[in-house]
Image (tube, grey):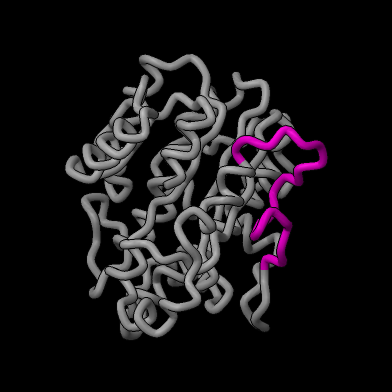
Amino acid sequence: AAAIEFASLGAHLILVGRSVGKLESLRAELSAANAADGCRLIVADMGSLDSVRAAVDEILETETVLDVLVDNAGAIFPDRITGPDGIEATLATMVVGPFALVSGLMPLLQRSEDGRVIAVTSGGQYTQPLDLNDLQSSQGSFSGPRAYARAKRAQVALVREWQRRLGPSGVTFNAVHPGWAATPGLADSLPAFYRSMGPILRTPSEGIDSMVWLGTTTEGGLDNGRLYLDRRPRPFDRVPGTRLTGDERRRLWDHVVALSGAPDPTPERWRSPRDQAA
């Protein structure tokens, strides 16, 4: 739904996903809506750093500027598994891979007059604390929904760090909560929740509204480094004991940089003394 809406507004789309079938199906939907002109498909698995790097290289070879990057990668795994880089699959797919993608494409975003990064989060991120000593869920019993919620919390924390570190370069970083929308992904990953909440779930069009607005609005006063719902900034934390301090967000950043295997994208001139010490 978001891709179709962006395309209807004149966007040139680069669709990145791991399923060839789903990408082709989406292109068919775009064609049916007369919105597929210039659409590119890139097959890449966010859970594999080699795959992410290949996608970055392909985009850098053909594009000179990137105005909006939407990170909507997500997956709930029933059991704890590790990906090809030895990273727990939820963390790899939802945190480390997208971090490497944003980092690799930052030069294109910085060439835009108004580059924007939008991370699609979930209300589940409010429910879980983030243990920086167990980011890969190796301690205790594994729960797919819990790992998902923790990954979303990490994602939102990183949005704040991206803004602090790269915001001065002119790129805007925000997270967006679409609300609980009736999507195939929700039905597949949380079927019981989907059935019980079905009557009050949002439509896909309602769910994408704030996402598309964040990517296209020309209204003044758009905040940077915030979490949005229904076009308004919302609190980062709601449940006691889940808030990350500034130092903890810095530690999370350092952990993810190390896992990504890439240099820290923080420009030297904008690093704080604490960042430089890290």
Residue placed furthest toward the left: 21
Q: Up-down: is 259 above or below 20?
A: below
Is 76 within the magenta? no
Which residues lie in the magenta part?
Answer: 215-236
Q: Residue at x 58, y 74 (%)?
A: 126
- Pinpoint residue 81: horizontal percent, then vertical percent: 23, 66
- Pinpoint residue 249: horizontal percent, then vertical percent: 62, 59
Q: Up-down: is 251 above or below 40?
A: below
Which one is nearer the viewer's eye here, 202 or 67? 202
Q: Residue at x 34, y 54 (%)?
A: 93
Q: Is residue 44 left or right of residue 204?
A: left
Q: Is residue 39 left or right of residue 162?
A: left
Magenta stretch: helix, strand or loop mostly: loop
Q: Residue at x 38, y 75 (%)?
A: 145
Judge whether residue 50 can be spotted in this image: no
Q: Is residue 210 left or right of residue 60?
A: right
- Pinpoint residue 260: horizontal percent, then vertical percent: 40, 45
Judge whether residue 244 can be spotted in this image: yes
- Pinpoint residue 255: horizontal percent, then vertical percent: 49, 55
Which one is nearer the viewer's eye here, 25 or 90? 25
